[in-house]
Amino acid sequence: MLKTFKGGMHIPDHKDNTNKIPIRKIDGAPVHIFPLSQHIGAVSVPKVAVGDLVKIGDVLADSDAFVSAPVHSSVSGKVIDIKPYFHPSGNKVTAIFVENDFKYEVSENITPYDLNSMTKEEIVKAIRNSGVVGMGGAGFPTHIKLSPPKEKKITHLIVNAAECEPYLTSDHRRLLEQGEKVVKGLKICLSLFDLPKGYIGIEANKPDAIEALKALNDEKIEIVPLKTKYPQGSEKHLIKAVSGREVPSGALPADVGAIVMNVDTAYQIAETFETGMPLISRIITVGGDAVKEPCNLEVRLGTPFKFVFENAGGFVKEPKKVLNGGPMMGIAQYSLEVPTIKTTSAMLAFSETEKVYDPDLPCIRCGKCTQHCPMRLMPLYLSKYSKENNLEMCEKYHILDCIECGLCSYQCPAMQGLVQNIRIGKQKVAEQRRKKQ
């Protein structure tokens, strides 16, 4: 029986165009742009100056803050500028510009690690120094996840291979082509907690990946087939499906003994210890009806979106919307000159906007948003109170528990942009809390 959670819904996955296409590595762009904010936590500080020569793997920026991770160069060349620049999130942040010399020289500092001679603390430090973050969502630094308070007893280490967002197939391809390295990364993390077994949760619409992982016959890894349902890949819902434990409101996965990491995160941990190479690239699904050749590309970080789309054959139709990420939770882009960052899982381009929201249409009280909400919230009221700026009622109705999955807006017959209103309300509530502290 397939495991799952209460709520959510099955939506068309649109994965057929790319799920059978092998990963293809592309060359670097003429100029790579490295924003200093690529994860949750403190913004990194430049460690290079304009005119400096850098090689692959060199640290471009870092921070002394605990919740942070360094940024490394993915090409060799010269630092030509450091200035505020547009970020896929829509904000402007300081970025380092490196002119690619196309020599792809690797830093002399890059050497493999000897795992057998390292302490647990040294392993965590190496993961931190390699710049590894969660590569499937908000980009939480992985070394923080792997350093829970001592009173939090971790019993479940889970790799999130659900990949429930429509169009996305990068995790699927990684598992098929390099599944053994994903398993190795998970086992390295298991050693930090002396756990006998880890879990890989994967949706049933990837039967070939499930069989490939099972064929590895690793007794320390349990493959957990999951019901194909959105948002099965949400951290809290994956924990519920795999372990049966529910993360309470306001709590963290470690509070119920769980740690979740993305497929690419586990892969990068293995890659770091095998080769010494920090996080400098990732797999990106390039798709949408405006793209000529939908595919999965291994892309060096800092590559402009325009260059990535060109490597997918360019556009066959004029795109009206370009997304960083999937169609449910991705962020619409205003320019193709923004750079690829650590959390860019997909680049999608569409010739038509499938749904147009009308803020003037009234709610018809159908209850669909409440029925399908995976967090068991009442999106119609959260949206209403957010629009009214009634932050007290927003808090009363647990607005901060919303994971912004987008299901409420997706199936709203009144065409209301519920998740956008809720997102604004969350920002206001969080800001109000910070002022009170």
Image (tube, rainbow, N blue to C red):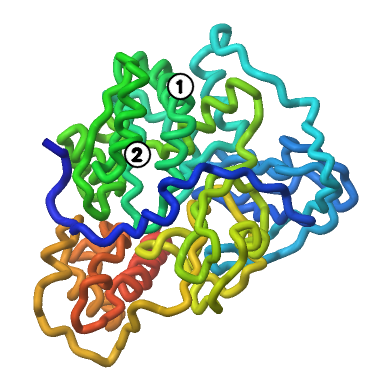
- Three-letter code, disc 1: Lys
Query: Residue 424: x percent and y percent?
Result: 37, 72
Residue 93 visible to an observer of this rendering: no
Residue drawn 70% across the image and 57% down it: 95
Relative height, residue 357 to residue 229 (above, below): below
Q: Give the quadrant of residue 165.
A: bottom left
Identify the disc placed on residue 160.
2
Label 1 Cα neighbours within 10 Å, binned few <14 / some 14-19 / many ≥20: some
Query: Residue 261: x percent and y percent?
Result: 40, 36
Residue drawn 51% across the image and 53% down it: 295
Query: Residue 47: x percent and y percent?
Result: 76, 43
Residue drawn 20% across the image and 58% down it: 10
Q: Secondary structure at mark 2?
A: strand
Q: Is residue 421 left or right of residue 127?
A: left
Query: Residue 188: x percent and y percent?
Result: 45, 20
Q: In this view of the protein, which residue sits in the foreground, 314 or 345?
A: 314
Tell me the CA gap for discs 1 and 2: 15 Å
Residue drawn 19% across the image and 80% down it: 413
Identify the disc placed on residue 184.
1
* Tag 1 near tag 2, CB within 8 Å: no
